[in-house]
Image (cartoon, rainbow, N blue to C red):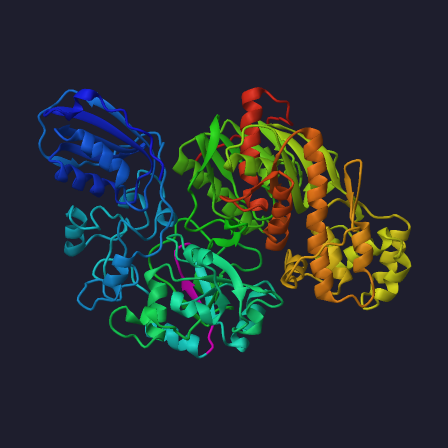
Amino acid sequence: MELARASVAPSVGRAGARLRVRVRGAVQGVGFRPFVYRLAQRYALGGFVANDAEGVLIEVEGAALDDFVAALREEAPPLARVDAIETEPLHPQGQRGFDIAASRPGRVATRIGADAATCEACLDDLFDPNSRFHLYPFVNCTHCGPRYTLTRQLPYDRAHTSMAGFALCDDCRRDYQDPRDRRFHAEPIACPACGPRLSHPIETVVTRLRAGAIVALKSLGGYHLLCDATNEASVVELRRRKGRDAKPFAVMVASDASLDRIVTASDAERALLNSIERPIVLMHSLGALAPSVAPGLGALGVMLPYTPLHHLLFHEAAGAPPGRAWQRAPVDLVLVATSANIGGDPIVIDDAERRLAGIADLIVSHDRAIVVRADDSVMAINNGGPSFIRRARGFAPRPILLPREMPPVLAVGAYLKNTVTLTRGREAFVSQHIGDLSTADSVRFFEQTIDHLIRLVGAAPVAVAHDLHADFASTRFAEALDLPLIAVQHHHAHVASIAAEHGVDAPLLGLVLDGHGVGSDGGAWGGELLRVDGARFTRLGHLAPLALPGGDAAAREPWRMAAAALAAIGQGDEIAARFADQPRAAALAAMLANHGCATTTSAGRLFDAAAGLLGVCAMQAYEGQAAMQLEALVRTPRVQDDGWRIDRGTLDLSPLLRHLATPGLDRRDGAELFHGTLAAALADWAAQAAAQARLSTIALGGGCFLNRVLSETLAAHLRARGLSPLLARQLPPNDGGLSLGQAWIAGQAIATDTPQEERRCASPFRLK
């Protein structure tokens, strides 16, 4: 926690002095007012504390003001994120009592905290037979529970949440008003007498899961689809009903004690798994679960329970013993816990009886509304630190601190893995993961997220940043607004996102490896070496282009890219025979021979070509499947020394592709040579460009850097050459981080009047 040094006048330590204290940051919904109240009691101070639109406002009067301000800095509640403490001496009023005053309206300049996993004290209450919260699935306090997903607007008061309709019983009201209680002014407080209710008994849910049923369970940010992860028939049936052929499922285990049965977990992975955010964490799978949980992959996404309801499921599975000792022993139930999103739509939050009726055998709901959708966050340990694959529950809407202040800008992201960003001063508020904008419901969720973010942040944007691609739903949304538009090149935004989160406000290199992005020349880019200087960039080089036979179909069918690779290395006459099981192989070979295809510099398609040549994956059921299965084969990356050429900024990997096309090459050998040689080639390419540009910092962006083997091997090579690689840490390196880069570029363009593609559109922008 980083706090600004409070400026306290020398006279404030005298008896009778009064001080106004402003605390800024994530200080609402985290127990900050009761914390201040108790400090005031400790130091015998009079005054008040209140939530308002800027954070927490305090006025204190007495003799120990210096001690009070120091304690604010050093003892803040665990969920608080304090950005600044500002003080102003006032004339004393003779006030002795201290009150928690009513919240004050105004223009919002504070922020709400993220949802937090159930704390240890609430778990003690949950399993204590003498507690009125015993086995109550919605127990919470100021240190844990829902925040963002139930908040409609700020200030953070019960009336502004989905708990507004639940009147407090006498016991809860007593706790709420007792400054000695950790539920003092805990806005979601509830108990069995006055709070939300579950639709089905826990025993029924566990019995059905044990019997092989698929259960839809309402969680914090939406419904999960659950089934027994050791029951292959159940997992296969869930895939059939959901229409999800091969994309891996995440699983939930009861506690740390159950972890070692299914994965090998490092200390860093365990720490991340047990963090208050409770993300899904990728770890090495031991192959102990049903084969269809994560087919063809070496990693398994695992999470721990993060709501009381989740804990109760495993408690029942353990035989419902008294107390919490059961959590220290393995529980045999492992649950597939996947988001209930169907056909590309966002995660279901309501109307589940209709929308999930054909998928779930049992739908378990409750009567606390979900205000904001939020999928589970997904993370991994990469290059020695945590990195995001998907940023959502537990982290949104925590802002990224920018290197400097900028005008308020709305950035609307791209098409895949969409997020949006709204800036306010030095804060960039990046939304939760929205997903691919491929359906009407997903676009509606995108629009709702923008509306909600603007209301929470309280900043009216002066411009809108978007991708160069004209057909993205996000671009069309931006064009419908009555605001200046700033079109940002896709890969420029990837580099800028990493620069912004690392606080780099100076020129740097960017190496971007992804699937696709429209280039400034209108081409299909995806393997780019850029020099980035704020709102400007220069393309220093790119991967050697490969044909893209069939356009978008090539991204779904790696055998097509393998055919393109064969054509590129002069073996096009082998395509028809090599891919004889593909009906279009002969026609595609003719098309390639006649140079009848568009080309791409995409690193993602290069991975597809390698997977296709090695016979790892011919057809993809989900984005990135070929690359993920290729990575899963690697044990030790190896380098083919003559595997690349660099010519006037172009990195040509034809020699490597020629080797991968060798008939009978072992898949594992090929995967290890591909990863090792690619990393060495990229390092050589980047080092040459860095020397010419006289730069040593290089941002590594784009979805290919989710590949741990590639990113760790490449980063090690770059460091060995004296370069400083920057990796995405606070956001994903893929398109989930793109909106931050768009916002950072647009803000700099506005501040410096850098020419961009700016237009105004006719329809009004209405903040609801």
Taking the spot 22% from the left edge, 58% from the top edge, the residue there is: 194
26 left or right, relative to 558: left
* Residue 201 seen in the figure: no
Is 147 in the magenta? no
Q: Position of residue 38 (x, y in %)?
A: 17, 42
The mark tally for this picture is 0
Looking at the image, residue 137 lies above or below residue 390: below
Quadrant of the frame with the C terminus: top left
| Magenta residues, dominant SS class | loop
User: Looking at this view, is 639 or 102 the one in front?
Assistant: 639
Query: In the rendered image, which quarter is residue 754 located in?
Result: top right
Residue extending farthest bottom? 211
Quadrant of the frame with the N terminus: top left
User: Looking at this view, is 8 or 198 the one in front?
Assistant: 8
Looking at the image, residue 651 lies above or below residue 276: above
User: Looking at this view, is 8 or 222 the one in front?
Assistant: 8
Q: Position of residue 210 (x, y in %)?
A: 42, 77
Q: Position of residue 46 (x, y in %)?
A: 12, 32
Q: Position of residue 535 (x, y in %)?
A: 60, 27
Looking at the image, residue 202 lies above or below residue 146: below
* Residue 229 seen in the figure: yes
Region of the chain picked out in magenta, as a range = 212-221
